[in-house]
């Protein structure tokens, strides 16, 4: 035990020493270094580079150190902008990380990448970020007017994880907008088969150009969660989501909108079955078609080889007059479909404000309310229960819980379900510990009405526990006899109904 304690103490000292030795660099118009490229040969592994607000023009850099952190300090109209005009000389992008083992694990936050392009002779594949190393995290960044926003292009790094949060992708694709001679090889995001896991959450994709895909992935695993993907009226894109090589794909809680000027009139493409995993989980998305012609929601090219093709609890809604096809090419033999809702007129479906991209539900969306069914888990035990809802990539995701254990179809849970008054009261109800082995404590001290009752539902919508009035103060309930999983609490206090989700581990 003493030897083990000594080892942990020694490792703590080593890690702290490494942390303390890292250098912080400041770049800006009034600093010693006015361009990011000027610190390229000065930084060491683990350093942090802060970029003041302002425009850094025509400064592209290949980084050669690992564990670097790049953080923009600009805000509002004075963000930290890496802006390029004309072809980038390095032939790849504005920020480039190209050597596995040498420039792994960059973290990039609050930076705008604008205008990345390279010449046709060099492949016309310029990127805001060109990544060919191991592991990258991008948070609160903006990619605009680039051939590719993020291009991950190394097929050898099979352990790489690409994590993208809270970011915006606009007007990316080949630089000649609406040029029908280009077939969409440049995209908002392109991830190669080298990546083990792609995670995209709370991002905003809009107005693609040059037949770009909003997101194209060949990763072994892709988690695309709680995003807004909108071609817009002037967008000229190809697939909104292109699953180019199969893999395990979880697409959940997104709003996906095909615009009226779409290039190929398809929304989800599944092109091949060449990854070891071949599973698609398309759950609780709201899919809107605004093209008044022949469209397909899914284009599945492979005739066989897809292990799982689960489509649960989605809303598919179209502009009137369109000819909507659910599957073109092949209908997967593994298709498992339940709880989906179709509409031929999205403007009358009952969305809160479709013109403003608010696809939350109102009480008139009767087709979607309580229409969902339990979707279970993936083959790797990831729960297919949306727990968040998109409101804006600049804001935190909104928690989503399911009243009565019956989930609504689509990307949003209604705040005012039929037959009950659900109010956003601001009242605090605390459930702890959560997750728990079975015993939960409930703090109801802030509720104005002590005539409160409580019900607990499992993920199938079955009532498994209840407490009847009078309930007040702090109480405890026991689910130790229930299977592990996600449960939903419904608390009725006067006219207020409060929902919480708990996890039994």
Image: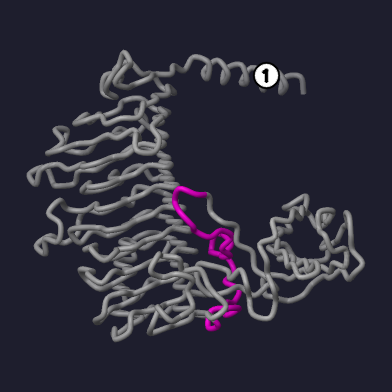
Whether residue 449 sits left or right of residue 392 in the image: it is right
Q: Which residues are magenta?
A: 366-395
Instruction: Residue at 84%, 70% (x, y): give it.
Output: 466
Across and down, in percent, residue 30 comes to 31, 17
The scheme the figure's colours follow is: one colour
Residue at the (77%, 50%) spot, across then down: 433
Q: Which residue is mark 1?
A: 9
425 and 409: which is toward the camera: 425
Is 104 included in the stretch rendered in magenta? no
Residue appearing at x 27%, y 31% in the figure:
55
Place residue 87 in its image quadrant.
Answer: top left
Does the magenta run of residues contain 375?
yes
Residue 307 visible to an observer of this rendering: no
Quarter holding the C terminus? Answer: bottom right
Q: For label 1, count other residues whose C-alpha is less than 10 Å away and answer few (under 14), some (14-19) or many (20+).
A: few
Q: How many marks?
A: 1
Residue 194 appears at what percent x and percent y?
Answer: 34, 47
- Height in image: 243 above or below 295? above
Q: Position of residue 234 (x, y in %)?
A: 23, 63
> In the picture provided, is 445 more to the left or to the right than 174?
right
Does residue 75 appear anywhere in the picture?
yes
Residue placed at 38% from the left, 42% from the top?
141
Helix, strand or loop status at disc 1: helix
Q: Quadrant of the N terminus?
A: top right
Q: Nearer the viewer, residue 228 or 324?
A: 228
Name above or below for residue 84 compared with residue 357: above
What secondary structure is the stretch in magenta mostly built from?
Answer: loop
Residue 206 picture quarter: bottom left
The residue lying furthest to the right in this view is 470
Q: Is residue 57 above or below residue 252?
A: above
**Residue 242 point in image, percent of width and height:** 31, 63
């Amino acid at each position: 035990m003493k030897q083990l304690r000594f080892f942990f103490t020694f490792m703590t000292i080593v890690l702290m020493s490494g942390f303390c030795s890292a250098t912080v660099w400041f770049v800006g118009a009034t600093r010693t270094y006015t361009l990011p490229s000027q610190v390229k040969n000065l930084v060491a592994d683990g350093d942090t580079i802060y970029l003041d607000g302002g425009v850094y023009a025509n400064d592209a850099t290949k980084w050669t150190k690992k564990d670097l952190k790049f953080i923009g300090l600009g805000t509002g109209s004075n963000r930290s902008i890496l802006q390029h005009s004309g072809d980038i000389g390095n032939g790849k992008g504005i920020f480039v990380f190209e050597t596995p083992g040498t420039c792994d694990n960059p973290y990039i936050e609050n930076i705008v990448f604008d205008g990345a392009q390279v010449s046709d002779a060099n492949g016309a594949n310029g990127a805001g970020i060109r990544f060919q190393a191991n592991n990258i995290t991008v948070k609160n960044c903006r990619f605009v007017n680039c051939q590719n926003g993020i291009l991950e292009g190394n097929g050898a790094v099979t352990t790489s994880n690409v994590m993208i949060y809270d970011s915006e992708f606009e007007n990316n694709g080949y630089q000649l907008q609406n040029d029908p001679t280009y077939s969409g090889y440049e995209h908002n995001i392109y991830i190669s088969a080298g990546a083990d896991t792609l995670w995209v959450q709370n991002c905003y994709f809009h107005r693609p150009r040059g037949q770009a895909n909003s997101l194209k992935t060949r990763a072994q695993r892709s988690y695309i969660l709680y995003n807004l993907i909108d071609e817009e009226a002037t967008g000229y894109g190809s697939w909104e989501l292109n699953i180019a090589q199969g893999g395990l794909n979880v697409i959940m809680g997104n709003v996906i909108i095909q615009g009226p000027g779409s290039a190929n009139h398809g929304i989800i493409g599944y092109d091949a079955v060449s990854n070891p995993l071949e599973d698609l989980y398309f759950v609780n998305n709201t899919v809107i078609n605004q093209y008044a012609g022949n469209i397909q929601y899914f284009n599945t090219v492979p005739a066989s080889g897809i292990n799982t093709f689960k489509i649960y609890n989605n809303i598919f809604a179209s502009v009137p007059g369109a000819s909507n096809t659910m599957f073109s090419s092949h209908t997967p033999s593994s298709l498992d479909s339940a709880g989906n809702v179709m509409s031929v007129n999205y403007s009358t479906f009952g969305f809160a404000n479709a013109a403003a991209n608010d696809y939350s539900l109102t009480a008139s969306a009767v087709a979607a309310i309580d229409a969902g069914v339990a979707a279970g888990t993936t083959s790797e035990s990831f729960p297919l229960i949306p727990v968040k809802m998109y409101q804006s990539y600049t804001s935190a995701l909104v928690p989503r819980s399911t009243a009565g254990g019956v989930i609504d179809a689509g990307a949003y849970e209604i705040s005012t379900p039929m037959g009950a008054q659900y109010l956003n009261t601001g009242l605090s109800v605390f459930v702890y510990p959560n997750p728990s082995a079975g015993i939960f404590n409930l703090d109801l001290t802030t509720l104005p009405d002590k005539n409160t009752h409580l019900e607990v539902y499992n993920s199938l919508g079955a009532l498994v526990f209840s407490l009847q009035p009078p309930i007040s103060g702090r109480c405890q309930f026991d689910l130790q006899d229930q299977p592990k999983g996600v449960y939903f609490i419904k608390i009725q206090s006067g006219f207020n109904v409060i929902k919480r989700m708990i996890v039994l581990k």
